[in-house]
């Protein structure tokens, strides 16, 4: 805390401040009533530095910590655990932090293990996914996939799928629940390619290929349909010469380059990729994609200006640059890629700034109409002040506001038992009160999102604001 105050870094204070106790509590007070047909686990990942950071701290640097509520028969259990990565184990053995982060000096890390071509720490702090009985935590710059016990949150170790996964993988893997297949991609900051692979339901890498690109690329997500995957070659890149000159990992937005989208058959090779060009932008997160006649439709959140810190006046502090960079002015967007004509169509779906979208995961890769996004409060720091439910078929939205001084988390959809429609179910979120320093889990009716929560589960400790989450239904846990 003293370090955070001295550094005046908002991402180490208040609702972002790390917690240091791993707890389990099954005696949680509930305001309202948890629907009896909810059975499963809500897990959220996020940065939580265990040791005092070295150099300027970037929010993306913190060690991964998972927070979870396990719900069954109207009762809930909370627990939290660090993701015990190989890099965290190295620091635990040393008793202090070793790596400087994104805003630090790369030269200070040169004696440490490299990850994807640069001396940065793989923290597995970004996202979680569930596939074939395995809960996986991953890193936003492509790293190891750490298998986590979905009940205890114990880190089991790096999952290499019986030695068949020889690359790293982006945290944003895509799971086709109907086919029981998981798509992933990988890159290196020093090599001109995107790697792409498919893991089947038998615990092995079924397909893997490397696709050449004009230079090193840093996509954040991908899209999948029933038969295709959509890879991204976007004009936000790390300029290696600039990195060497300045000594820090600074992304550069090349406004004169188009965005490119590579549509590849699920088990395709480089010669099968169809490239489509669109307006320059950066895309952190997709919502869904599907096939519609000759077209691939993809909904996502598009950021037209991913490096706004460049417009700050000369002499701006590191914290000011960090705050500006993380404002993420992103908007709902739709692409249509015509496989017959090669034409791209794109248009904005809404003028509200939202991101961190989720949808009914049972529909991933198939036509869908609903998305559950986080609304940004557009203050100095990145905070989610509401859930926005989009209906892209009727072009409408519903909003659930967390409340004054309250900020939420990425909010998964929970299907109701014997659901009759895509949005027949619930939406769940961790919510933290930035003034009181308390947290709860709220459950709302997905079809009546703008009404009061059905249940508010009071938690024994504050959950720091973080990144991505997922819901794992009880029937999938038992497979």
Image (cartoon, rainbow, N blue to C red):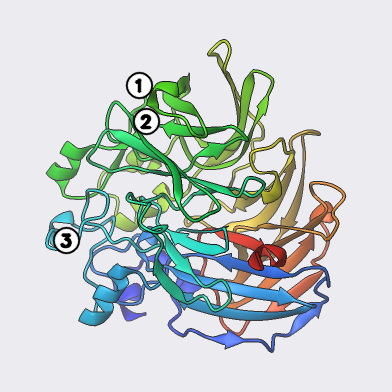
Residue 136 to residue 205: above or below? below
> In the drawing, does residue 269 fall left or right of residue 372?
left
Q: Residue at x 57, y 80 (%)?
A: 79
Number of numbered discs overlaid on the protein picture: 3
Foreground residue, 413 or 132? 132
Assign a secondary structure to mark 3. helix
Residue, far bottom:
27
Assign a secondary structure to mark 1. loop
Q: Residue at x 64, y 62 (%)?
A: 471
Quadrant placement of the C terminus = bottom right
Foreground residue, 341 or 118? 341
> In the drawing, does residue 193 fall left or right of residue 415?
left
Residue, far top:
341
Image location of residue 440, percent across then percent down: 66, 75
> In the drawing, does residue 419 fall left or right of residue 366?
right
Image location of residue 284, percent across then percent down: 48, 43
Assign a secondary structure to mark 2. loop
Real-space Cα separation, disc 1 to disc 2, in angstroms: 8 Å
Q: Which residue is mark 1?
A: 256
Q: Tell me if label 1 and label 2 are in contact, CB under 8 Å.
A: yes
Q: Which residue is mark 2?
A: 235
- Mark 1 or 2, nearer chain start: 2
- Mark 3 or 1, nearer chain start: 3
Q: Which residue is mark 3?
A: 109
Real-space Cα separation, disc 3 to disc 1, in angstroms: 33 Å
């Amino acid at each position: 805390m003293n370090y955070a105050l001295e550094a005046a870094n908002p991402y180490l204070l208040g609702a972002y401040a790390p917690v240091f106790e791993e707890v389990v509590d099954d005696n949680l007070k509930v305001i309202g009533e948890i629907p009896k047909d909810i059975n499963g686990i809500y897990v959220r990942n996020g940065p939580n530095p265990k040791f005092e950071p070295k150099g300027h701290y970037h929010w993306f640097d913190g060690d991964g910590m998972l927070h979870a509520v396990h719900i069954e028969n109207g009762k809930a259990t909370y627990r939290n655990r660090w993701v015990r990565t190989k890099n965290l184990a190295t620091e635990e053995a040393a008793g202090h932090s070793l790596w400087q982060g994104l805003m630090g000096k790369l030269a200070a890390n040169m004696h440490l293990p490299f990850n994807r071509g640069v001396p940065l720490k793989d923290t597995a702090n970004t996202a979680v996914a569930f596939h074939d009985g395995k809960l996986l935590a991953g890193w936003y710059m492509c790293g190891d996939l750490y298998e986590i016990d979905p009940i205890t949150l114990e880190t089991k170790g790096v999952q290499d799928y019986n030695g068949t996964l020889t690359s790293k993988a982006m945290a944003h893997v895509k799971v086709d629940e109907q086919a029981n297949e998981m798509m992933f991609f990988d890159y290196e900051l020093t090599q001109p390619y995107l790697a792409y692979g498919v893991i089947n339901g038998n615990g092995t890498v079924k397909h893997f290929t490397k696709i050449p690109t004009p230079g090193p690329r840093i996509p954040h997500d991908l899209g999948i349909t029933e038969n295709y995957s959509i890879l991204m070659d976007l004009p936000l890149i790390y300029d290696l010469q600039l990195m060497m000159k300045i000594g820090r990992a600074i992304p550069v937005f090349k406004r004169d380059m188009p965005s490119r989208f590579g549509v590849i058959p699920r088990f395709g090779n480089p010669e099968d990729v169809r490239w489509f060009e669109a307006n320059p932008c950066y895309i952190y997160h997709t919502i869904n994609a599907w096939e519609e006649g000759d077209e691939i439709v993809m909904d996502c959140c598009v950021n037209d200006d991913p490096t706004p810190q460049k417009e700050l006046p000369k002499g701006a502090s590191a914290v000011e640059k960090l705050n500006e960079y993380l404002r993420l002015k992103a908007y709902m967007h739709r692409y249509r890629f015509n496989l017959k004509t090669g034409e791209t169509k794109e248009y904005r779906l809404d003028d509200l700034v939202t991101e961190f979208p989720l949808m009914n995961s049972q529909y991933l890769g198939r036509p869908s109409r609903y998305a559950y996004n986080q609304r940004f409060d557009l203050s100095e720091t990145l905070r989610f002040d509401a859930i926005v439910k989009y209906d892209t078929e009727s072009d409408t939205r519903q909003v659930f506001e967390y409340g004054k001084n309250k900020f939420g988390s990425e909010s998964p959809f929970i299907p109701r038992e014997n659901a009759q429609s895509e949005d027949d179910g619930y939406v769940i979120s961790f919510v933290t009160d930035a003034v009181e320093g308390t947290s709860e889990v709220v459950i709302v009716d997905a079809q009546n999102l703008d009404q009061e929560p059905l249940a508010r589960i009071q938690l024994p400790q504050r959950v720091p604001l973080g990144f991505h989450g997922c819901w794992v239904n009880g029937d999938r846990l038992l497979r």
